[in-house]
Every structure is written in structure tokens, then in C-alpha cells.
Image (tube, rainbow, N blue to C red):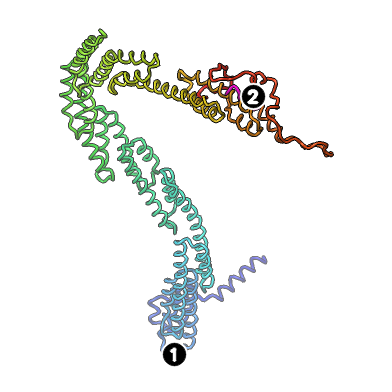
Amino acid sequence: MVLFFGGVGFAATAMLLRLPTNNSCNNLSLLFSSATNRLYCAQLRAEEDTVEGFLAAIDLISNLPEDHPLISEVDRYITTWSDRILAIAQEKYHQGELEEAIAIAEKIPTREANEALISQKIEEWQSVWEEGESIVADIEEKLRRGQWNQAFLATVQLLELDNAYWSSTQYDEMVQTITLAQEESSELDEAFASINRGGIDNLIKTIEIASRISKSSFSYDRATELARDAEGQIIDIVKDLIDDRNWAEVSTIARQIPRSSPIRDKADDWSNLASAGRNANLNTVSGLNLAISQLDKISSSSGVYAETRKLKNRWTLQKEDLIYLTEAKDLAKPGNVDSLQQAIARAEFISNENPLHSEAQQEIRKWRREIQVKEDQPYLNRARELASRNTVSGWQEAIAQAQMIEANRALHSEARNLIAQWRGNIQRVEDQPTLDRAISLGSQNRYQEAINVASAIGSNRSLHSDAQSRIRTWRREITARQNFNEASQIAQNRDAQSLSRAITIARRIPSSTDVSAQGRNAVNSWSEQLLAIARRTNSLQEAINIADMIPSGTSAYNAARRDIQQWRARLAPPPAPRRTPTNPPNNNVDPRNITPPNNDSDQESTPITPDTEISPEPTLEQTSF
């Protein structure tokens, strides 16, 4: 009951307070209505709290005369409703709807006292709006340049604007825009790194990354430019590969181009071109026909159209001449001279402008060689038959027969080698007696005569090299004998200097000469004589100097070393103990009282002459003395 009666009371109160509707507020009634009724109807429209309601309310009462009793109350209502309209426009302004706010403000009747306020408000709104747009434009320009920190600093300026749209909504949007731009720029940096590394894989990766940048992004222009650059590099690479006819690599690149790439159409053309190239490389009529049909799929607007036209013309000619070449090979199969000549005649139809010209010429050269071999082989066989008699006349006839093969013939090189061999045989037969006579003289130690005889064999003769080798050997023998004779002549003086010089000269005698053994024995004998002279000298120092002349490898060398050691020890005896000397020291040592080692005592008692035979020591050098 309480709820019921309370609800009835509330409804009754609301009805009493609410202005009743009146049919007198329709348009027709208002034409003849009183000012009080018009004011009442205006209040009803103003209760709608809309721009249209306030404007309609003002319009109902704005035409009262200045002396009307209700004019002051009407002016108050108009001022209130105008302020309310301006407040609605202000709300639109803060919501970011500047044009609508200005349009609403301009609908306020301009005859009222708030006209200056309205103009001032509109100017303030436009000024703030222009400042906000300027800040945003500055932020966007910094974003395009990748100046993230400066963009953030510029964004803070939006917070200072006296407008909720710019200081809140636009500020949040700019922060999100900068964050997104940073993320996209990071992806773009990866794209730059890829394109700088180069290579097809990196270039394709660059295109894929750049394609993920949306058109609304501030990095879109840079991404588009980067993708265009990468695509241009790929096109250049493919062009070089097409020029090199590297169809496998062209096909691989074409498959890697993303479907979303602007050069996907070009990639499809590359794929068709590569497939046609591989079929053409089969070098068969069917392969060339298939290749030409694949070229026809490439449109005239394609970037490789000009190349396809050249290839089509080339492959068309190649197909025609391939038929000629195939027929020529079939004609050459029997292998006789007539069939080979027919094959050559057919292959010569292929012009030098045709891709198969090189192969055709190679086949022609091969067939001509076969013809020449078949024509000249009988001459060569006959020459070998004549040379098989192994006589001078047989070789001469063989040479005459082989010379019938001309220089530009296939068997000329073989014939020339055989001619050189047979001429060598003839020269050996002619010059061998001369060389044998020279060898005989050399074996008799008549070296100069042997050299004179062997020198008669000229440099263009087969035995010339053998003769020169013999001559060098005989000249070494002559030089060796001269050295031996000179050393023997000098050694006859029998003094230490002469013997040392004789040993030096004799040691020059090569071990491969006939007098090497004599020289070796003489050197040993002269070294023994030097040791004997050293042992007989009166001065220890002189004895050491003479013994030092004995070279290593001689029979007296080891004994001389031992003697030198003892003599040096006597020249520098160890210090004696301190004591009073009873007799003055005897500094005159007689070398003749020096006792040699026991193992050399026999050598002193035995006289040594240059003719003494002494066996060499095992350490004697084998190449020189």
C-alpha cells in the first residue's frame, strides 16, 4: 500500500510540474498566437536540449517588438539558449569535430550580444586546431626521417593544447604511431642489412620484409624504394644469367620470387624463358619446337620480350640446320671416301651465322681428316715396308715415299717423324766408323787425335751428341794428365812448399779419369814426405806449419795431427811448481830429439819417394784429392 500510494503521489506531482502539451504550438496556430503562447511553445522546444530545439525556440520569440512587455524575459531566454548552443559546439570542438562545432556556432543568431564571443571562440578553435595540425605534421616529418626521440618530444606539445581531442586522443594516437613506426623501422633496418649483403637470397628477403610494411606506415616510402632497389638488382642479375644462357639459375631465382612481389609477372616470364632454354639445349628438333612454343607464351610487354625474339630466330635457324647436320652425319656413317664427301657437302649448307656452324665445321674437319688418312695411308704403309729392310737404300726409298704426303695432310706429322727417324739411321750408319776410330784412338790414350777425328761429326748429325760427350771425356783426361805432370814436376823440388803445391794441383784430378789412381798414390806419397820434413826440422813452430800443409784424406794426415798436438804441447808446457832453480832452463829444444809416437816410428826410418806405393786411407775423398 505504501508503494502504491507513493507511486501515485510521485506521478501526480510530475504531471503538475510538467508543462502540458498544447495543440496551439503547431505551425498554423503559432501564426495567430499571442506572445505568451509563443514563449510557452519556445520553452517546450528548448526542453529537447538539442541545437535544433534551441534554434527553433529562439526563432519563435526573436521577432517580438522592442517595446513588448515580455521583451526582457525573452532576451534572457535567448541569451541562455544561445549559450547552451555554444556549449554544445564547444563539446563538438573537444571531440575533434571542428567543422561541425564551427557550423553550430555560426547558427547562433548574430544580432545578439554574444556575437563577439562566438567569433572569438571560433578563432580560438581554429588557432588551436592549426597548432595541433602543425605539431602532428612536424611529428610525421620526424617519423619519416626516423628521428624517434625528436618525435616523442614533439608529441609532448600536444598535451599543452587546450583541447581534449589533441591533448588526449591525438596524443595517444601519436604515441602508438611512433611505437609502430619504430617497430617497422627495425624491420626495415633488417631489410637494409640484407640488401647490403647482396646475393639473390638476401635480395628476396629484402623484398619480403619491405612488403610487410603497410601503406599507412611512415616507413612505407622507404620500404617501397628499398624493395624497388632490390628488385632492380635481381633484374640485373637475371639479365646477366640470361646473357650467359644459365637457364638453371634463372629458373631457381624465378621460383624464389614471392607471389606478392611486383616483379612476379617478370619471374613467370623468366621461368618460361628458362624452361625454353633447357629444351633448346637438348639440341633436338622436338626440343627446339617445344622451346619456340614456350617463347610464344611471353607477351610483347615483357621485359625479356626482345631477348625472346632473338632466341626464337636463333632456334628456328638452329632447327633448320640441325636437320642438315643430322642428314650429314647419317651420310658419313659408311665411312668410305664418297660418303664422307657427300656428308661434307651437306654440312656446308649451314651458314656461319647459325649456332650449329661451329659444330658443323668440327664435323667437316673430322671427315676431311678421315678422307686424307684413307688417301695417304697407302704411301705411309709402303714407306714402312721399304724401311723394314734396315739398309741405307731402303731408308732412302722410304723417305722419298713418305715425302709424297703434303704438309697440310692429316698424316704429315707422322710421316715427318718417320722421316727424321730414317735419316737418323742413315747418319748413324755413315758416321759410326768415324766415331769408332775416335774411340779406338782414345783407348790408346791418343786423346787429341781422338778429339780431332770425332769433331768431324757435324752438329746436324745423329751421332753428334755422342761424339761431343766423348770429346768432353777426352779433354778431361788431357787436363788431368797435364795436372799430374805439372804436380810431379813441382814435387821434384822436394821442399815443403813444392810438395804442398804439388798436392793441391794433383787433388784437382777428377776421380773418373785414368790418372786418378796415380794422382791419389802420388798425393799420399807427397804427404808422407811433408811429414818427414816436418819431423826433421829444427823448430817446433816450423814443424807444426809444415805438418799443417798435409790435407785431410791423405795417408799421413792422422799421424801429422798427432805430431802437431804433441809439438804444441811442448811449446806451451804446464806451469812448474815454485822452487829455487838449480840449473838455468834449456830453451833450445832440438826437434831431432823429439820422440814420435810408436805407431809412426817405422815411417821415419823408411825413405819416401814419389814412386812409393801407399794404400789410401778409408777417409780419402772419392771425387778429388
Q: Residue furthest top?
A: 389
Q: Amino acid at mark 1?
A: His
Q: Quadrant of residue 328?
A: top left
Residue 300 location (% of width, % of height) = 24, 44
- Pick the residue in front: 403 or 476: 476
Q: Amino acid at mark 2?
A: Ala
Looking at marks 1 and 2 on the same chain, the residue that comes earlier in the sequence is marked by 1
Q: Is residue 380 left or right of residue 577?
A: left
Question: Is residue 403 one of those drawn in magenta?
Answer: no
Residue 22 in view (yes/no): no
Residue 342 in view (yes/no): yes
Query: Which quadrant of the rendered structure holds the N terminus?
Result: bottom right
- Pick the residue in front: 159 or 578: 578
**418 is higher (above) or lower (below) than 77:** above
Magenta stretch: dominant secondary structure: helix
Report the span colored magenta: 554-562
- Pick the residue in front: 209 or 464: 464
**596 is higher (above) or lower (below) than 121:** above
Disc 1 to disc 2, C-alpha distance: 166 Å
Question: Is residue 555 one of those drawn in magenta?
Answer: yes
Residue 460 location (% of width, % of height) = 27, 22
Query: What is the secondary structure assignment of the residue under circle 2?
Result: helix
Q: Is residue 333 left or right of residue 557?
A: left
Q: What number is the disc on residue 68?
A: 1
Q: How many marks?
A: 2
How many neighbours does mark 1 have within 10 angstroms: few (below 14), some (14-19), or many (20 or more)? Answer: few
Q: Which residue is mark 2?
A: 559
**59 is higher (above) or lower (below) than 600:** below
Query: What is the secondary structure assignment of the residue under circle 1?
Result: loop
